[in-house]
Image: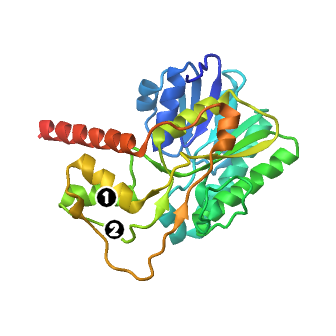
Amino acid sequence: MTPHLKEHRVIITGACGAIGFALSKRLAEAGAMVIGLDRAGSQETFAADVKGSRLYIGDLLNIAFLTNAFQEASKFGSVTAVLHLAGQSDANQCEVDPPLAYRQNVILTANVLEASIKHRISRFIFPSTAYVYGTEYQEKIKEDFPVLPWGVYSLTKLSSETIIKSYVNLGSINADILRISNTYGPSWKRNTILGDMISQAEGNSKIILRNLRVVRDFIYMDDVIEAFMRLIVAERPGCHTLNLSTGQGTSAGELASLFCDIWGLPQEAVESPADPKATASWLVLDNQALYGRLGWRPSISTREGLKKILAILKEQRKICQNEK
């Protein structure tokens, strides 16, 4: 059961992002007051959809803005936790401009930590990525496995993790770091496996994927949000790293097969050019530590998650057609 969060006040950076906005709504529904921070967004829309909330728009890398927003938040009472979701989440954009990615993901994390400590907030929750482990393991990855990051995005996340652990070691704050597997949901991205499938299916009757042997641990956005909700009321002293995943691997080929079945395409619609260099890349996380902490595991299957997304897409199409 989702915890009741009446009397809790939570700061969310990146509150207008896909996960941040959905999480803000869920928190408000559970009785919490949400203080959102983002660089862009509508205060009116946020206030209408996230009842009893406040949204502050500005450059989060600007120390003056960040300090002022935290000061305003403190006027509403003691803040339970800071959920730091802001940053550059597009791995491709991180590769295009690594210095900017470093500022947006690493420097910003340090700034938000400083603001949290200055305003005597004792709890910090941070979403990292499964990709800090790399894709070389061929078994379920536990939190104590050595990290083998590849790419700028995973390096910035790992750097942020290190900074968080350093602050915790100083005794300034308690923190939870969630290493999250491949997240998917209604706000899908075009540069992902699922995003490619949806884009191609909407435009034609074929789905062409580079490598059907890639295996990933797909977790639906609602389960990610549920984990954040439960973690807020499950504080423990120190710094804890937890894998947030389903613990189940699904290959790109299996995902495409499920997608075709739900979308109504024949299985023959899936094609993959012959590539002798294509390898069975594997990234599946063990979630036993998460279960031990929360007594909960993600419950939305890949099939169920795909059905939810495609139902939303069909409803959006119907609305667009009615507006014409």
* Mark 1 crowdedness (10 Å alpha carbons): few <14, some 14-19, many ≥20: many
Q: Splitting the image into 4 quarters, where does residue 196 fall?
A: bottom left
Q: Label 1, secondary structure: give it.
A: helix
Please tell me which residue lies in front, 97 or 66: 97
Residue at the limit of the structure toward the right, as seen here: 170
Q: Position of residue 120 (x, y in %)?
A: 79, 32
Q: Answer with mark 1 or mark 2, whichever residue precedes in sequence.
A: 1
Q: Give residue 244's quadrant in the image.
A: top right
Q: Position of residue 156 (x, y in %)?
A: 64, 61
CB atoms at circles 1 and 2 under 8 Å apart?
yes
| Vertical order, 10 against 289 (above or below) | above
Q: Image check: 100 left or right of 167?
A: left
Q: Residue at x 42, y 29 (%)?
A: 44
The disc label shown at residue 284, or none:
none
Quadrant in the picture for residue 79? top right
Judged from the image, the secondary structure of the residue bearing numbered disc 2 is loop
* Residue in the picture at 53% in, 45% down: 246
Left or right relative to 302: residue 133 = right
On the question of residue 190 being in view, the answer is no
Mark 2 Cα shell of 10 Å, populated few (<14), some (14-19), many (≥20): some
Could you say where residue 117 lies in the image, as x and y percent from the top left?
79, 39
What kind of colouring is applied to the model shown? rainbow
Task: Name the residue beneath numbered marker 2.
Answer: 209
In the picture shown, does residue 65 fall above or below 141? Answer: above
Inspect the image, locate mark 1, and give the three-letter code of the amino acid beneath it.
Met
Question: Is 290 positioned to the left or the right of 56 in the image?
Answer: right
Q: Which residue is mark 1?
A: 197
Residue 211 visible: yes
